[in-house]
Image (tube, helix red, strand yellow):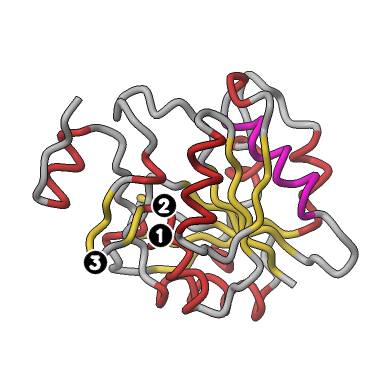
Amino acid sequence: MIRAVILAAGLSSRMGRSKALLDAGNGETFLGRIVRALNAAGITDVSVVVGHDRDVMSEAIRRDRLPVGIVVNDRYMDGQQSSVLAALDAIDRPGVTAMMLTLVDVPLVSSATVRAVVDRYQETRAPIVRPVRGHDHGHPIVIDRSLFEALRHSDPATGIKPIVRAHVSPAGDVETSDEGAFVDVDTPERYAQLFGRRLER
């Protein structure tokens, strides 16, 4: 079983508001669009990590009836690694073979890319599976259970990136032309460029 986690606990300081609840078009928020892509790819066990603005986020999730579990990270000010560890504690159960990890500010990834990453993991059981485009790498990534303990003991100063980088492989790299797997939306200017609307501060 692959359990998916969406990291959405941060301050969104550069955006000036919660990225998870930004309008992604067609009546969807960033969070809703990501959940839909995951579900369409066959990933139905999805959790979202909340921290900053947790009450607003939780209410929006209930309002939109998003089929996700909510993981509260009380230590979100410690950085992204704290959200990964909170998620891991919540999803690590018998039968879970891997964690799929993605960021709420990468809302445009397609369900086809998610499916391709899942298929590659199921075919190879590579410790890290991720979409790539040349030298670029994107989201979501699948982290095999064999790395869970390494994640738990990762250095807070560097987070999980060194662990991911140490275990990438040709078997786990999924070439894709899906621009959405590589586009992060973390400033009002980037949002306006991609979605054609400006945010009021």
Q: Secondary structure at mark 2?
A: strand
In percent of width and height, residue 173 lies at: 50, 63
Range of the magenta residues? 80-91
Q: Which mark is residue 26?
A: 3
Instruction: Give, as a three-letter code, the residue at label 2.
Output: His
Q: Is residue 49 visible?
A: yes
Q: Nearer the viewer, mark 2 or mark 3?
A: 3
Magenta span: helix, strand or loop, mainly?
A: helix
Instruction: Give, as a three-letter code, the residue at label 3.
Output: Asn
Q: Nearer the viewer, mark 3 or mark 1?
A: 3
Position of 193 relative to 180 (above/below): above
In percent of width and height, residue 106 lies at: 37, 50
Q: CA distance from mark 3 to mark 1?
A: 28 Å
Q: Name the residue located 59 percent from the left edge and 50 percent from the top edge.
A: 48
Q: Name the residue located 36 percent from the left edge and 51 percent from the top edge.
A: 135
Q: Which residue is mark 1?
A: 132
- Tell me if label 1 and label 2 are in contact, CB under 8 Å: yes
In percent of width and height, residue 83 lies at: 64, 36
Q: Is residue 128 visible?
A: no
Q: Which residue is mark 2?
A: 137
Graded by Cα atoms within 10 Å as few (under 14), some (14 to 19) or many (20 or more), the crowding at tag 1 reads some
Q: Residue furthest right?
A: 94
Q: Quadrant of residue 72?
A: top right
Graded by Cα atoms within 10 Å as few (under 14), some (14 to 19) or many (20 or more), the crowding at tag 2 reads some
Which sits earlier in the primary sequence, circle 1 or circle 2? 1
